[in-house]
Amino acid sequence: MIPRIIGCLVLYFDMDFDVSIVSEKLGMMPSRKCRLSETRINPITQKQNCGYWEIRTEEFETFDSKDIQDALHKLLHQKYDTIKTILMRYQGTAMFRFFVEADPSNPPALLFQEDFICDINRINAALDIVLDIQYVYLDELEQYDLAELEEGQTIVIRKEQNEDLVRISPTAFSQRKLSICNEDN
């Protein structure tokens, strides 16, 4: 499986205002947006979630995160001063987020280029990487030759979604030990 990666920039706001203003100032339509007063109450903190304005790249099938970094830079490179002004004016914060879907035995390279790191610093943004690792389900297990696992690879066997049964690594397999999963790990 070739990894699939989407990159995005999310601007978060603790101030309630019409976030369409962000679109007007940047001259671009967001992928998603929501003002503070329209967000839900966080069940953990019992506080209102932040308002946000988000722009996403298209989905890339690639092993190299440079493609996504280049797409974000192309989208935003002339907008960083405006973004910084918006963040200051509306008490916002910024986060670059990468959604990565991959096979655990064949992940993409997540090496960040100097230009992209400069973009992050320019608007004082955070960087978040969301990994969605593809798992093996019991009914698919016969398709895998566990003896061919390489160091650093792990297969997670699941009975059903969100229900890990066993994690298999080369060391565990060679020692004939399996890590049984339960609610504690």
Image: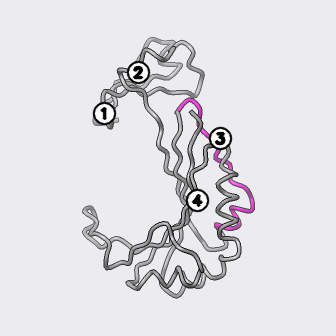
Q: Nearer the viewer, residue 49 or 179?
A: 49
Tag 1, which secondary structure?
A: strand
Residue at left 39%, top 25%? 157
Mark-to-mark CA distance, 3 and 1: 28 Å
Residue at left 68%, top 45%? 64
Q: Which residue is denoted by mark 3 in the rendering?
A: 63
Q: Is residue 19 above or below residue 46?
A: below
**Looking at the picture, which amino acid does disc 3 mark?**
Phe
Of the 4 image quadrants, the one containing the C terminus is top left
Q: Which residue is denoted by mark 4 in the rendering?
A: 57
- Sequence-first disc among 3 and 1: 3
- Sequence-first disc among 2 and 3: 3
Q: Is residue 130 above or below residue 86?
A: above
Tag 2, which secondary structure?
A: helix
Q: Which mark is residue 163?
A: 1
Task: Please rate how many residues cluster around mark 2, counting C-alpha atoms within 10 Å: few if below 14, some from 14 to 19, many from 20.
Answer: few
Residue 126 x, y percent position in the rendering:
55, 64
Task: Please rate how many residues cluster around mark 3, counting C-alpha atoms within 10 Å: few if below 14, some from 14 to 19, many from 20.
Answer: some
Task: Please rate how many residues cluster around mark 4, counting C-alpha atoms within 10 Å: few if below 14, some from 14 to 19, many from 20.
Answer: some
Which of the 4 image quadrants contains residue 63? Answer: top right
- Sequence-first disc among 1 and 4: 4
**Looking at the picture, which amino acid does disc 1 mark?**
Glu
Q: Nearer the viewer, residue 108 or 58?
A: 58
Mark-to-mark CA distance, 4 and 2: 32 Å
Residue 115 counted in the magenta span: yes
Q: Which mark is residue 140?
A: 2
- Sequence-first disc among 2 and 1: 2
Residue 169 x, y percent position in the rendering:
50, 23
Q: Which residues are magenta?
A: 104-120
- Sequence-first disc among 4 and 2: 4
